Image (cartoon, rainbow, N blue to C red):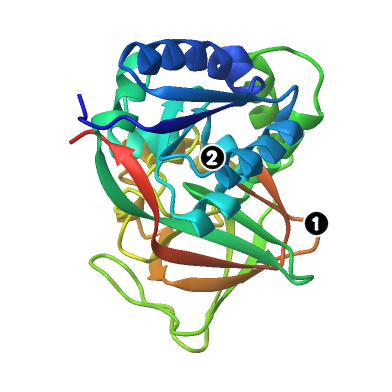
Amino acid sequence: MTEQVGHIAVLVNPASGHGAGADGARVAVERLRSRGAHVKTYQGADADETVALGRQAVDERPDVVVVAGGDGTVSSVLGPLLSSGIPLALVPGGTGNDLARQHGIPLDDAAAAADLALDGARRRVDTGTVTADDGTVRHFVTVLCAGLDSLTNERTNRMTWPRGPARYLAAVYLEWLRLRRFGYRLEPVGAGGAGGPGAVGLDAGGLEQDGYMLAIGLTRTYGGGVPICPAADPADGLLDVTLVQAMGRFRLLAFDSLIKAGTHVERPEVTTLRASAVRLAAPAGLVTYADGEPMGPVPVTIRAHHESLTLCVPA
């Protein structure tokens, strides 16, 4: 246990993980108080109120902000948190929890995750921003997607039946039936690209390619552990781009097992590259999602911010 236990703010999103965020928060608060911490809890009635309370929590200058929720909750409060420099501890309570997966934060033990606020290591990690042409800026911490996967998310959010995981599976099937290819254009921004092992650098002319799926990641996984960007380093200041090129409908189905194994990037039908920032253009109407949340339609500029967040992780 740390010698000096200070003020800890626990921010709860009751909508995360169908109540898992609130359940994890109760365990975390009990654990932290049992260890002598001064804990103040901030819980809104919905996601919007949680964001407002996140700003209030940061303004009160705690030693650590604990977020009990998912990746979307983290990214929604990231703006004020980054400007404050206050460390973040995460008690996973979302659907995917890919930030926690990346950094070895316990997924099913809220008390152990809460302990990291007191005696976990402090690791500097990258965050990302998505900037629309109107200047709107949104933050993310895992992977941005645009294509079949983002349209599936969009359809899932519109559907009211069936309930639970079956709704997502139904959305996947419906989007597969109306499979569309997209004319992606990636352009370098500022310093441009940096090639890495197994990666194609993004030169000054940019890249134009038809495809079905595009993922731009800070972390290796999205969607609850799917390694769409298997070589991503969360602290290198670079975005890992994975573009699945256009192919036959049934051939794409076979790609699902390759993506889940992380071996899809070895195939010639997949383009990978790394860059510190890219501008993404694609056909009108294509939406982008990151951390499981809508980030708005294309075109957008995506940028990695090197080691901009202090995260409490296992030592």
Check disc 2 and report the residue beneath it: 74
Residue 114 screen position, x and y as percent: 36, 23
| Amino acid at dot 1 | Gly
Give the image quarter of residue 166. Answer: top right
Tell me if I can see residue 216 in this picture.
Answer: no
In this picture, is 311 found above or below 165?
A: below
Between 27 and 286, the residue placed more toward the observer is 27
Rendering coords of residue 106 (x, y %)? 32, 23
> Which of the two residues, 147 or 193, is positioned nearer the viewer here?
193
Residue 253's place in the image compared with 78, above or below, is: above
Residue for point 65% across, 41% down: 56
Decide: few, some or many residues near mark 1? Use Cα within 10 Å; few <14, some 14-19, many ≥20: few
Mark 2 or mark 1: whose residue is earlier in sequence: 2
**Residue 92, horizontal then vertical, whole percent:** 45, 25
Q: Amino acid at mark 2?
A: Val
Q: Residue at x 30, y 63 (%)?
A: 236
Q: In the rendered image, which quarter contains the N terminus?
A: top left
Residue at image position (52%, 37%) is 71
* 150 displayed left or right of 141: right
Image vertical order of residue 133 relative to residue 67, above or below: below
The residue where tag 1 is placed is 285
Where residue 84 appears, as percent x and y from the top left, is: 50, 55
Left or right: residue 145 versus residue 62 is right
Count of numbered circles on the image: 2
35 and 196: which is toward the camera: 35
Q: Secondary structure at mark 2?
A: helix
